[in-house]
Image (tube, rainbow, N blue to C red):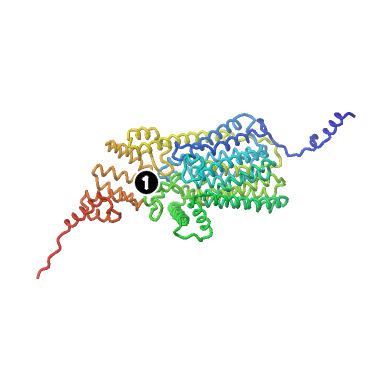
Amino acid sequence: MGKKNKAAKQKSESPAANPVQQPKKTITKTSGGSSTMTNWLIVLVAILPFLISGKQVDPAVVNRFIWLGVVVLIFSVVFFLRNNKKTLPAPLPLPIKIVFISSLAYTAWAIFSSINAVNPNEGYYVISRHLLNMALLFIIVFTVIHEEKQFLKIAKALVIVGILQSLIGILQFYESAFTELPGNYIPYGLMANRNLFGSAQALLLPFGILVLAQGNKIWKYVAGASVTLLAISVFISQTRSAWLASVLTGGIALILVCIFSPAQRKQWLIATGAGIVIFFIAFTFVLSTSSSDEFKRSVSGRVASFTGSSPDSSAEQQNVSERFKIWNKTLQLIKKDPILGVGPGNWRIAIPATGSEGTAWETGVYVPDQPHNDYLHVASEAGIPGALLYFIPWIIIGLLGLQVVRKTKSDESRILTICMLAGMVGFAVDSMFSFPEERIEHSLYFSLMCGAILGVYYNFYTTERNKNIEIPKWVSYSIPFIAAFAIFIGSKRYNFEIHLNRAMAFDKLGQSATVLEETEAGKTSFITLDPVGKSLEIFSGMAYKATGQTDLALKELRQAEKYHPNSYMVANNMGTIFTDMKQYDKAIEYYLKTLKFTPKFENVYKNLAVNYYELKKYKECVETLDKIKWQTDDYLSQLYNNAKALMTAQQPPAPTSSN
């Protein structure tokens, strides 16, 4: 027999070629290729974290939100609305159905709770963001079900993202490059916020660990570099929640591997030990090469705050104290309405009414925009029932992941699930001290973790994969509708923020006519406030005031007051308008309202004193000025002395005693 015939015979007799010896479990493939859907997700994760623009009030939110909506829309059209692309090899297990039912129920509850909101319009963006994340989760689950083996490609893409994001942050830290990017305290990377940069980097760690465990030799080196750089960038972010999330992510992954994957225990322990040594060397290098004494003091202070040895007067301890104050005030909102909450998007509207004495925003310099705790945030806006509906899926997904880790015979599926479970723990911890729930890239990483676990659970759960269950039409059509609605809301917010940003810039330049043009171009009923509660009407109102159109100014500010009745900016400007109109009683009413929100806002005391003086309430004028340092201001000194003299003149003479 010739070599070719012999080889052909051996091939035909091999188990791989014999259909009788194939396992009963059959896998349904998409017609677009084995990794078509995965490639779409790679495009999503490779681009989204790098979208940033200084044109918006928040440079790293709305543009990413729109991009996410665009990808979800295209994906749903390509894979759900076209024929032969929207089937599952078996029905969804009940636990997975409960995850999506609970998420849909939360949406319905959030809409219902909007009836209790001061500003229901602010719910449009919050609800559309939740729906978009839910649609994304379904897409990820669907993709993993069909292409579980390809998920490693997504992790590899995120490894590269981690390297690039880390380098940007590290170069910012050394002030070598990228400092012109919009953001607050360096290093903020492409997140525009140092704390959010740290937490985003921490959420990339589980994907780097996954590639370290399952990649080939080259990718192991790349992933090792990514994990090291991620750890350094988390360290220099000085974000305690990100530090804790990173440690728990690595620790949980190691513990689960040691318990459920004995064959890899030794390898993981050695790798962890080597990683700790490398990180220690890297951290020492960063501390020794940093020329910033403030950074070194900040790091030591934050480390001390973990042990409780940080002095109460330190900035780090004051930051912790401030956080507790915000939490207590948020709890007050929850206690006030534990069922419906204040309505989606309305926390920043309701929280000033709880008072600001003793907080960072009592002087009017800062404005409360977040409670820095997603659990309290959701509960305050949607009530306790809404919070349960929102967070129950997290618990279910975690339990399903543990079931896979315990029972699966596939070591690849086990390690994938372990890494994603560890990442979920990191996200849950960060949510306790920060607000990753509202950030687009953070939610994307979390959705990937949850979707991977649900997809692996589905593949583990189903034993027969040949039924070709068609996705219900309402699901196929609702996902592109959700994406289109999100894009619409995103475009409205994009336009709003661009014109608000420009209006604020022209307001500083005193160009009132241009301010009015910008505010008119940006107004929409779908978005009424920026992330810190400013409306366009504040600036149009003051622009009308500057041009002498008092009636129009009052009209605009009344609309701003309707959107945010607890805004100290609105109340103070209303007081100014009524002062110009010589309605001093009304002006005093609004200035006193302003002081309820900002009791140490000195300008308000000055304005209030002037109005008391005009009403000949000299005693109140003097008492008001006594609350601030009027001695260094010539105008205030004259006002005080005049009021003091007139107050004395107003006093009736003391009765004379008769003999």
Left or right: 419 as drawn, with respect to 490: right
- Note whether 298 is above or below 82 in the view shown: below
> Which residue is identified by label 1?
567
Number of marks drawn: 1
Q: Residue furthest right?
A: 1
Percent of width and height locating residue 206:
61, 46
Q: Amino acid at mark 1?
A: Ser
Residue in the foreground of this view, choosing between 160 and 149: 160
Residue 104 in which image quadrant: top right
- Note whether 604 is above or below 58 in the view shown: below
For disc 1, the neighbor class at 10 Å (few under 14, some 14 to 19, many from 20) is: many
Residue 592 appears in the picture as rendered: yes
Q: Quadrant of the C terminus?
A: bottom left
Left or right: 333 as drawn, with respect to 463: left
Percent of width and height locating residue 584:
24, 47
Percent of width and height locating residue 443:
54, 43
Taking the spot 33% from the left edge, 35% from the top edge, the residue there is: 511
Left or right: 321 as drawn, with respect to 557: right
Residue in the foreground of this view, choosing between 144 and 204: 204
Residue 385 appears in the picture as rendered: no
